Image (cartoon, rainbow, N blue to C red):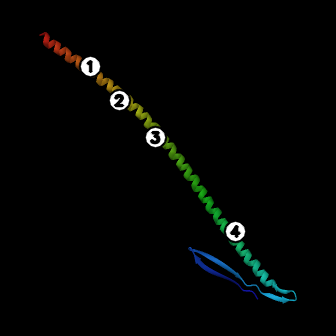
Amino acid sequence: MSNLGEKSILKNTEKEKRLVVEISAIETPRGLVPTVESLKNFVDMLNKVIARIEDVISAILDNLTRVAERLESTERMLNNVAMRVDLVLAKLSELKVRIESHSKIEANLEAKNNELRKENLRKELMSFFEK
């Protein structure tokens, strides 16, 4: 009769199962014919393979779902960071305009101050020479 055996082999840290089906046959006038039990064992083995394939597909889908969720989360986070960077750039631009404006005002004040000093110095010199 048939002998259905399973062997476990460690490969790349995952178990790989090998299914072995021994087919028994009976002699008939037309040649060897597999026994009903052998065919049943073969179908059982195919069902196990299909079940394992379904498990693997299910695990892959679960992993893909988790990856998609993480990608969506990462996308939201990156969008948030991009908005903050845009805000910081806008604030820096405003600050630059204010600094430039302040620098121009300071330069104008200093120029006027220098003019006033020159005028005061000229007046003092004139008054000194007038005496």
Q: Is residue 7 above or below residue 120?
A: below
The N terminus: image quadrant: bottom right
Task: Answer with the quarter of the image where residue 57 lies.
Answer: bottom right
Marks 1/2 in contact by CB < 8 Å: the verdict is no
Helix, strand or loop for disc 3: helix
Identity of the residue drawn at 84% across and 87% down: 31
Q: Is residue 100 left or right of residue 33?
A: left
Identity of the residue drawn at 62% across and 76% down: 16
Q: Nearer the viewer, mark 1 or mark 3?
A: 1
Instruction: Where is residue 49? Give x, y as percent.
Output: 70, 74
Residue on which disc 2 sits = 103
Marks 2/4 in contact by CB < 8 Å: the verdict is no
Q: Is residue 65 left or right of residue 122?
A: right
Q: Is residue 2 left or right of residue 130?
A: right
Q: Residues within 10 Å of mark 2 (few under 14, many from 20)?
A: few
Marks 4/1 in contact by CB < 8 Å: the verdict is no
Residue on which disc 3 sits = 88
Give the mark nearest the N terminus, 4 or 1.
4
Q: Specify the label residue 54 is tagged with.
A: 4
Q: Residues within 10 Å of mark 1 (few under 14, many from 20)?
A: few
The amino acid marked with disc number 1 is Glu
Residue on which disc 1 sits = 115
Marks 3/2 in contact by CB < 8 Å: the verdict is no
Cα distance, mark 4 to mark 3?
A: 50 Å
The amino acid marked with disc number 3 is Val
The amino acid marked with disc number 2 is Ser
Marks 1/3 in contact by CB < 8 Å: the verdict is no
Q: Is residue 100 left or right of residue 39?
A: left
Give the mark nearest the N terminus, 1 or 3.
3
Cα distance, mark 1 to mark 3?
A: 40 Å
